[in-house]
Amino acid sequence: MIRKMLLVLFAGTLLTTAQAQETNRASLVYIIPIKEMIEPALLYVVRRGVDEAVRNNADAIIFDMDTPGGAVNAAKGIIGTITQTDIPTYTFVEKDAYSAGAIIALSTPNIYMAPGSVIGAATPMMMSPMGGVQDMPDEVQEKMTSAVAAMVRAAAEQGGYDPLLAEAMVRADMEYSVNGKVISEEGRLLTLTNTEAEQLVDDEAKHLLSKGTVKNVDELLNIIGLGNAEKRILEITAAEKLARMIAAVAPILMMLGLGGLWLEFKTPGFGIFGIAGASCLLLFFFGHHIAGLAGMEDVLIFILGVVLLALEVFVTPGFGVLGFSGLLLIFASFVSAMSERMPGSWQPVDFSPETLSMPFLKVMLSFAGSLALAAVAGRFLPQTQVFRNLTLEAVLSKTEKDETLLGLEGTARSDLRPSGSAYFNDRRIDVVTRGDFIPRDSLVRIVEIHGNRIIVERVS
């Protein structure tokens, strides 16, 4: 009996101690910056910050926002992340919250704005791969606008705001009134200043959008009763910064990578072209993997495509099923690597036009650019001193240097891509083409002699 009483007393003491420790625990607030353009790489950063806040039992998450907008798919992923947490979320609009930034802010139940800040103008626009706004057919524009309007209404309902107010930020053909006064005329997108956003609505006696104007995050914390809380500002790592930069120059990396591999196939051994091409493509996949877009399956698909292409070039000269399949796999790996999916896990790519159109267009431009680079290199590179230093040239005897070799026909002893060797009258001579591939055992003719360089062409 006494033992039971002691056990109960001990358990009660432990419970009281745990409750006291919980009561004395300092409050914790996570501050996640949403600055500059919103792109898919930012989704990974936000998800990491929210995950840390959940694991450390944070009392609040504040999104410190100053952005001109960005990718709608990235904003959709960030909204999904906000929805999944039970931690109170706040948005502090430091200066601008346009487009995708406004959509993200609407999904948080608490919005505060700095003096002179603005929020709104969330109509969708198609951006070209090289920057700038791209014109769209009316039916495509309406389809995108309708989809974004639905997403904005859902975000507003999640945050507890008027869905029509949110839709007026997307559709210019809407008129929106507050307290009998039109604040957004038909033909103009709704954009609110900090004073307009915090005005009271008569019918419901609550703020229209913003709960108040504050100078900074510290003042916001004082208002919500967390002035003494520990602040942890999410630091963007160097790898995440690199991922955001890579996302901006992805087409250039793909073009240089594919061009480098093509030039490597055309030159013997493994040299500077192969290293440069592989480095560009590794950087491309690394950046998109850090951004939470590319998975290892994309890298494996790409490697398989390169292997099939190499087999086509080295084992079965010409171009057939292997080469076409290799190019198709490489193309698919690039599109998949840039398409939206949840970071950190395998999920099928969303095959909607809004998701695939921009990656598809970027990959098409990169392939076209690499073909143009290959054509230019094949025409001018063999004439440069750099290329001459990369080709295999043997020291020829005085007899072999004689101009009488011009027009001599022989047989290619090895594949010429573009350098190799050939037999002329039972003599083996190292030769080079003008950049063309000539398979082994083909009939060739000497057409030019420049010192040690013997240039041949295929005889039909």
Image (tube, helix red, strand yellow):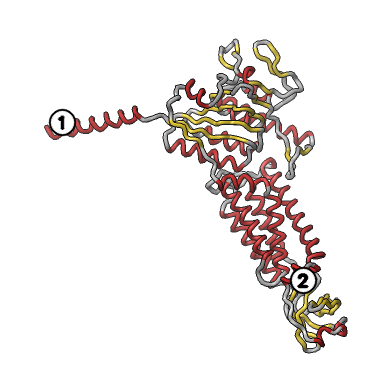
Residue type highlighted by circle 1: Met
Residue for badge 2: 437
Across and down, in percent, residue 20 comes to 30, 28
Question: From the image, which quarter does the C terminus lie in?
Answer: bottom right
Q: Is residue 120 left or right of residue 397?
A: left
Q: Is residue 16 left or right of residue 49?
A: left
Q: Residue at x 54, y 44 (%)?
A: 237
**Secondary structure of residue under mark 2:** loop
Circle 1 Cα neighbour tier, 10 Å, few/some/many (<14 / 14–19 / ≥20): few
Residue 459 visible here: no
Q: Nearer the viewer, residue 241 or 259?
A: 241
Across and down, in percent, residue 160 comes to 56, 22
Eyeballing the image, is 310 above or below 101?
below
Residue 219 visible here: yes
Q: Nearer the viewer, residue 326 or 214?
A: 214
**Secondary structure of residue under mark 1:** helix
Residue type highlighted by circle 2: Phe
Q: Is residue 375 left or right of residue 158?
A: right
Eyeballing the image, is 23 above or below 445?
above
Q: Quadrant of residue 342?
A: top right
Across and down, in percent, residue 327 comes to 70, 59
Residue for badge 1: 5
| Tally of numbered tags | 2
In this rendering, the label closer to the viewer, 1 or 2: 2
Q: CA distance from mark 1 to mark 2?
A: 92 Å
